[in-house]
Image (tube, rainbow, N blue to C red):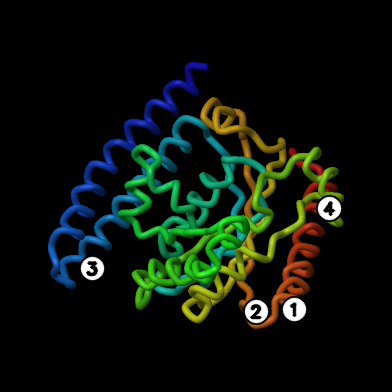
Amino acid sequence: MIRGLISATFLFLNTVFWCVFLYVFALFKYILPVRAWREASSKLTVACAENWISCNNWALGVLQGIRWRISGLEGLKPDRSYFVCANHQSWTDIVVLQKTFNRHIPFCRFFIKQQLAYVPLLGLAWMALDFPRMKRYSKEFLQKHPEKRGEDMATTKKICAKLRGKPVAILNFLEGTRFTPAKHQRQQSPYHHLLKPKVGGIAFALEAMGDQFHALLDVTIYYPRGPVTMWGLLSGGMPEAVVEVQEIPLPKADDRESLQTWIHQLWQRKDERLANRLSTPHP
């Protein structure tokens, strides 16, 4: 309990500290119509985010003593663009991915729904960091307003244009939600340790930004003692994490059916890696 409270307090204060600087740089970026300054401000906001992650990683090392077993980072470069996908078991996956990739690749962003821009503290940070935002219309809305069809993609592409010409990394959990045995059974997933991947997320990203990505980073996250909640992480409940990264070429997004087949093969290999991990005794 004490360790968890100390960790949570540090995380909160660290977030507030770096957000103050991030907001200041973002403010100048938006009020000064000078391209050079805006580009410099964008780099400074990213530096704030990376420093925030570094401080969080330091705290995890001091307070938690987690044993990290990370492989596959060789050859990755922060001046290249990547599409990152990973299996999803817990909210701690985000922390694990930040620990894995911070300063090895460009700062990792993910598509957020338009409504999340209004989340206290983090919403403004995501906007300042140019997180690509999705403006999606429901089927019911499009039936009543067919003239809006295709406008959501056009809006997202316009937002993504801000990231053109600079290295970027986009993260997507293809399963769309965290793995649980109940969800696995309800889906009747063909995989033993994964939920069914959704083709929409990667197709959306490839359509909006596909020509910018150098490669796909396929990430397999495994917790030898089982996944934990965020509180479990902060209170010392995650002694070890295993992360395997594989860099592979991206598929073409022209044909949705062939993309679905490619993703199925990707997920089948990931499922086999997880099965091998689960069958290997750990100390």
Residue 230 occupies quadrant? top right
Q: CA distance from mark 3 to mark 2?
A: 31 Å
Residue indicated by mark 2 = 251
Residue 56 place in picture, x, y as percent: 41, 40
Front in this rendered view, residue 204 or 41: 204
Amino acid type, residue under disc 3 in the picture: Glu
In whole angstroms, how far apart are the C-alphas of marks 4 and 2?
Answer: 23 Å
Type of the residue with mark 1: Ser
Q: Is residue 172 above or below residue 160?
A: above
Q: Which residue is mark 1?
A: 258
Q: Earlier in the sequence, mark 3 or mark 1?
A: 3
Q: Residue farthest to the front?
A: 144
Question: Which residue lies under the disc numbered 3?
Answer: 39
The residue under the point 47% across, 36% down is 60
Sequence-wise, the earlier of marks 1 and 2 is 2
The CA span between labels 3 and 1 is 38 Å
Q: Is residue 229 above or below residue 88?
A: above
Amino acid, disc 2: Pro
Closer to viewer: mark 3 or mark 1: 1
In whole angstroms, how far apart are the C-alphas of marks 1 and 4? 20 Å
Q: Which mark is residue 189?
A: 4
Any part of residue 280 in sight: no
Label 2 neighbourhood size at 10 Å, few (<14), some (14-19), many (20+)?
Answer: some
Query: Which mark is first along the chain, 2 or 4?
Result: 4
Q: Position of residue 14 (x, y in %)?
A: 33, 36
